[in-house]
Image (cartoon, rainbow, N blue to C red):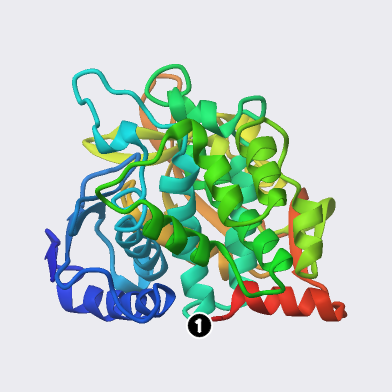
Amino acid sequence: MIGTYSPNHKITAKEIAAEVTQVLGAQAKFLGGKLPVEKYAFMFYFTDKPLVTYGALEHSYSSLYYMPETTIDNMRQQLRDFAAHEFFHIVTPLTIHSKEIHQFEFNDPKMSRHLWLYEGMTEYFAGSVQVKYGLITPEEYLGVIRGKMLSASNFRQDISFTDLSQFTLDKYGDQYGNVYQKGALIGMCLDIKLRKLSNGKYGVQNMIADLSKKYGKDRAFDDETLFDEIEKLTYPEIGHFLKTYVGGAEPLPFKEVFDDVGVDLILERPAKRFSLGYDNQALGIEDVEGVKRLKIANPAGLSQQGTSLGLKGGDVLTKLNGKELPPFGGDLFAVLTKERTSMKEGEELSYTVLRKDSSDVYKPVELKAPIAKVDFIEKDVLSFNENPTTDQLATRKAWLTPQ
């Protein structure tokens, strides 16, 4: 069942159903041929108000989504990602969880040490199911993984994932977002290692299925012994991995793991790209006559393109290439992405900005400059090795295709 509230009627339940149907079809195959529930509700609440953050929550047999209102074309992939993630929560933590979660004390909460399992593995499955059943290509999937690697690098690297999880309600609250980044990457590493050790026959899908049989929604595991239990189900190498890279603060062994599936990793290389004049750290939000708009809050985030345009700190962006920019929200970022991806070298980039004069009054200013690619350092570049070994190709196939 799908329910939708869209204040300006930009998206309908029928449009969402077409996307969710594909996701659920893939998830049924992923989970062994049958969905784990007979009835499930997806509830979508879209808002046309400015948002800094948004997301979703799972319940036993339903999930609620709070998202910026835009068209299906602008949100298709994100909607699929969200729906896949929340539905997979039926497995973790609703079926597999520790005593801390099973008997959660809302007045005096104690967190489990295993958010890598509840959120990280769920997020990994949400991407893995889409590549395995053709909703995204393997190359697009490498882009998803790379994005998580880049995002994870912005969080602290000196704390173990089990500590992050156990203390996420207090001293590590600002690190919680990493459960969707490094947490998913832990799932990926485990999957590839299991496929390698089992000659492709056993992966994290199988591991989670075995844990479900051993525990289930009415029997909780002990936080402290989970790694040992997983080692008994799998291999000593998996126990070592969990204790070293999840229970410890060692960096994930990406080079070793990617080598098992014939994926080349370049840590850094100089490159050029098109830029709208700034990166995310340059941006802020300004309320102008009741409308929240993007502004240049930190000039240090301006690129060479932004410098050539003459953008300055405090500039409020109102038009791009002669087109009115929407207020801060989902439509705005869809427009910016579309404009950036259509840029061509040698053509002109233009902005209309509001800039305060000496009397502290906003005045429109026109800015123009030729489009030219800017220099930057490209990090964590992933690509499939075109000449993989037989073993690499076999493990890659087991990782990316249905088994």
Residue drawn 63% across the image and 72% down it: 399
Specify whether 349 is left or right of 135. right
Whether residue 314 is visible, yes or no, is no
Specify whether 390 is left or right of 53. right
Seen from the viewer's position, the closer of residues 41 and 260 is: 260
Residue drawn 30% across the image and 62% down it: 87
Q: Tell me residue 216's x, y (percent).
A: 31, 54
Which residue is the site of mark 1?
A: 134
Amino acid identity at mark 1: Gly
Residue drawn 23% across the image and 35% down it: 289
Whether residue 70 is visible, yes or no, is yes
Q: Quadrant of residue 85?
A: bottom left
Seen from the viewer's position, the closer of residues 178 and 298 is: 178
Residue drawn 32% across the image and 63% down it: 83
Q: Quadrant of the C terminus?
A: bottom right
The local secondary structure at tag 1 comes to loop
Q: Tell me residue 18's x, y (percent).
A: 27, 81
Specify whether 167 is left or right of 106. right
Q: Tell me residue 108's x, y (percent).
A: 24, 18
Question: Quick check: 292 above or below 71?
Answer: above
Q: Quadrant of residue 262?
A: bottom right
Q: Quadrant of the N terminus?
A: bottom left
Seen from the viewer's position, the closer of residues 129 and 300 is: 129
Q: Quadrant of residue 145?
A: bottom right
Specify whether 307 is left or right of 271. left
